[in-house]
Image (cartoon, rainbow, N blue to C red):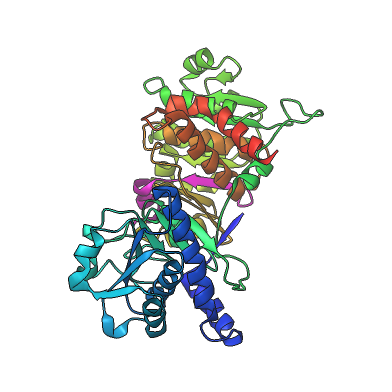
Amino acid sequence: MQGIWTTERIREAEGRAFAVTPEGELMRRASFGLSVQIADFLEDHTGSVSGRRVVLLVGSGDNGGDALWAGAFLRRRGVAVTAILLNPAKAHAKGLQALKRAGGRAVPAADGPQWIAKADVVVDGIVGISASGSLRPDAARLVELVEAPIVAVDLPSGVDPDTGAVDGPAVQAAKTVTFGALKPVHALAPVHCGEVVLVDIGLELSDPDLRRLDIVDVAAAWPVPGPDDDKYSQGVVGIAAGSATYPGAAVLAAGSAVRATSGLVRYAGHAADVVRGQWPEIIATGTVADAGRVQAWSVGPGIGTGSEGRDVLRYVLGQGVPVCADADATTIIAKNPDVLDARDPDTPLVLTPHAGEYERLMGHKPGPDRVTAAREAAKKYDAVVLLKGHCTVIAAPDGRVAINTPRGAWLATAGSGDVLSGLVGALLAAGLDPWLAAAAAANVHSLAGAIAAQNAPTSASGLVHAIPEAIRSIRSLTS
């Protein structure tokens, strides 16, 4: 599991390291690692290192210093390096001296365009983790001129380091080289960060603020039947979804639970005939009261927000088993919070709102700080909250947060959320910790989307059928 630390924690760790490390040593470690990554990028994209042209966009402070020192190291490998100084008076003095001694060139911002036009790679050393807000106008004008791929130093400038928010001009990097530890921006702003590479500079950090599951975590968590298992021991999940008018939600949610290798799926609702026709292995009944015993419920997609939907949700919440409440169920809770009185406080609940449903639940939009937003909702409802978006944020009431960084934007399609709710329910029924169940489901959901899409638009039905391949691929990488 990858740890992610806030910039405040990173600065504290850097302060401790500076106190026991010779002056300039941490910067040299970082900049040497940066130079290696830039050289690798050059070789991968141009076929060579020596003779290539690198332009550094250099701001004030240590971030610019890292870029300048990296430029000095690159000069030793025969790279032509030009540093464009956005604020010459505040450029990192020792880094600038090192670059010039190595034969590098430094020019003012006014002369920048002619050098940018010739670059094979541009290095973003404009601002670091202490910055906030979008790019300043002079930097933004230069970035607009860049056609070569950009390698960002620590983080792409103009992107908030703790929230990943972008509210104006910002760098969109092909690769980001960060130091010491991953920061929230690296998980929350994948479009702007590109490939993220971590360079170890010897920081000592305790428990992370955020986490991101890797394939090892997902493979270890995902239930796989053993020789002593049967359909009941693998987890029995109930699906309360869809209606006679909108049966698709039922087919998708129930189908994803089947494809997630649930031992048994029970469906309850008006779409029973359609679900049974699509998935003959599902036991389908007309009402939740007739569904039989389950070990978890997924409820909400397509059930409606009227009195019947409220009765279904209230019944499910009162069964004393974990519940994933999705779609219409979240709206019912927002409008009729008394339905939660049916829930035993010790029974796990997972809420899966998108931004609009979050606003209904909380009375305000998630805003740019989606991690804080998810934590607030988790605390208010004493539930795991899976806040949907390009990056999915999963918060537990105890403060744990996981971030699922997507594999493209293929999940932005109708019915995708119904598929996710079935996955979460299946994992809850298998006995996983609700926070881990939600995070692992989000991971496989995004991988299935990438497999189904194959770089072309896909549908939620295609997503359902790609789930086994996603699970197989994760397990094959760890076997």
State the residue in front, 186 or 356. 186
Q: Please say whether residue 358 is one of the residues in the magenta stretch.
A: yes
Q: Quadrant of the C terminus?
A: top right
Image location (x, y in percent) of residue 458: 39, 28
Identify the residue at horizontal 39%, vertical 62% (top origin): 152
User: Up-down: is 176 above or below 58?
Assistant: above
- Residue 299 in view of the camera: no
- Residue 8 in view of the camera: yes
Q: Please say whether residue 235 is one of the residues in the magenta stretch.
A: no
Identify the residue at horizontal 24%, vertical 64% (top origin): 115
User: Up-down: is 102 above or below 377?
Assistant: below
Q: In which quarter of the image is residue 146?
A: bottom left
Numbered range of the magenta stretch: 345-365
Q: In which quarter of the image is residue 396?
A: bottom right
Image location (x, y in percent) of residue 412: 37, 38
Identify the residue at horizontal 57%, vertical 71% (top origin): 201
